[in-house]
Structure formats: C-alpha cells, structure tokens
Image: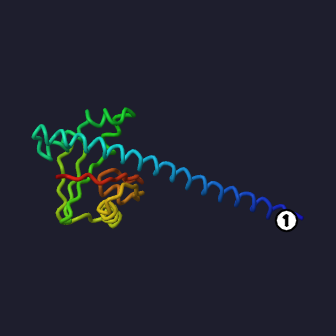
Amino acid sequence: MKWAMALAVVLVFGLAYLDLLREQRLALEDFTSEQTALAQSYASALDAQLRQSHADSLSLRQFFETLVSPRARASLDDSSTTAESSTRVLLDDPSGSWISYSAGAQPVDHRDGPSHPEVRDLLRAMRGGNPGTMLLGRDASASLELGARRSVAAYFTLELT
C-alpha cells in the first residue's frame, strides 16, 4: 500500500511537471506571436520613415543612426532605459555581409558573416522575406552584445531602394 501511495505522488508530480512544460511552451508561443506582430508594425513604421528620409536626403547610415538613438527607442518603447541596451538593428546584405546598430554605439560592419550558428540561421531566416521570430540562446545573444541571456529576435524585410 505504501508503494502505491508513493507511486501516486510521483505520478501527480510528473503530471504537474508536464503541465508546467506545456504552459511554458504556450506562453512562449504567445510571446513570439506578439513579437511577430510588433515586427510587422515596426516594419511599416520604418518603411514610412525610410521613405521620408529619402525625401529628406538622409543617407542610410544617418537614418539608422537616428533609428537606434536613445530618443527614438524611447518613443517606440516607454518601458525603461534598458530597452536601449537590449535592442539591435541588423541590416543584412545579400552579398553575405551585415551591419549591426545599437543605441549609443558605432555601427559594426560584419564582412565575414556571423560567427555564431544561431545568428547565421537568423540571417538566413531574414533573407526568406517573411516576418517572424527566432529564439536565440545565451551564446548567440552574447555574440550580438545583448548579454549572456536568451533573446527573442523579431525580424522583417524592409526593401531599401
């Protein structure tokens, strides 16, 4: 009888653990779908800003420097100043090089391509042309100078003509 009670307790804890895993997966799916919607609306806003910058004769570099400035980030995200340090804008060139922009830092030109495999996968997904999200592990996030933590990358295509 005692072993049956112990087995029942283990079974209940096992089911609770499986339910926890399911809830975590669902929460992450909700979060990534929200990030995808945010990326799509961000793409629309950037497209409008980019068209205006062409009309104002701003260079692409000037446009993206203003885009990642602390003031621009504050207008997009009122949550806190940590948004500045946790935002990267990646520009991918079909030739294989890419540029990363972040608030308060000089743009970094990556001519040799990304060194981390997850970042390579992200750029490959970006080249697919559809908006989406990708969960990056700690090492991939650190390679983008986001700190050694997991990050959600929301991406979209913006035609630069």
Measuring from the top left, give residue 10's x and y in whole percent. Answer: 75, 61
Rendering coords of residue 51 (x, y %)? 19, 42
List x then y, in percent, for residue 91: 23, 54
Front residue of this view, candidates 140 and 88 = 88
Q: Is residue 8 left or right of residue 30?
A: right
Q: Which residue is mark 1?
A: 4
Q: Secondary structure at mark 1?
A: helix
What amino acid type is highlighted by mark number 1? Ala
Residue located at (42% from left, 57% from top)? 135
Q: Nearer the viewer, residue 38 or 9?
A: 38
Query: Considering the image in quadrants, where does the N terminus appear?
Result: bottom right
Image height check: is 13 above or below 69?
below
Report the colour scheme: rainbow
Q: Locate residue 27 relative to residue 47 in the image: left or right.
A: right
In the foreground, 74 or 144:
74
Categorize mark 1 by other alpha carbons within 10 Å: few (<14), some (14-19), many (20+). Answer: few
* Left or right of 121, for residue 18: right
* Quadrant of the image occupied by residue 131: bottom left
Residue drawn where x is 25% and y is 41% of the image: 48
Q: Look at 54% across and 50% down and name the residue there.
A: 27
The image quarter containing residue 25 is: bottom right
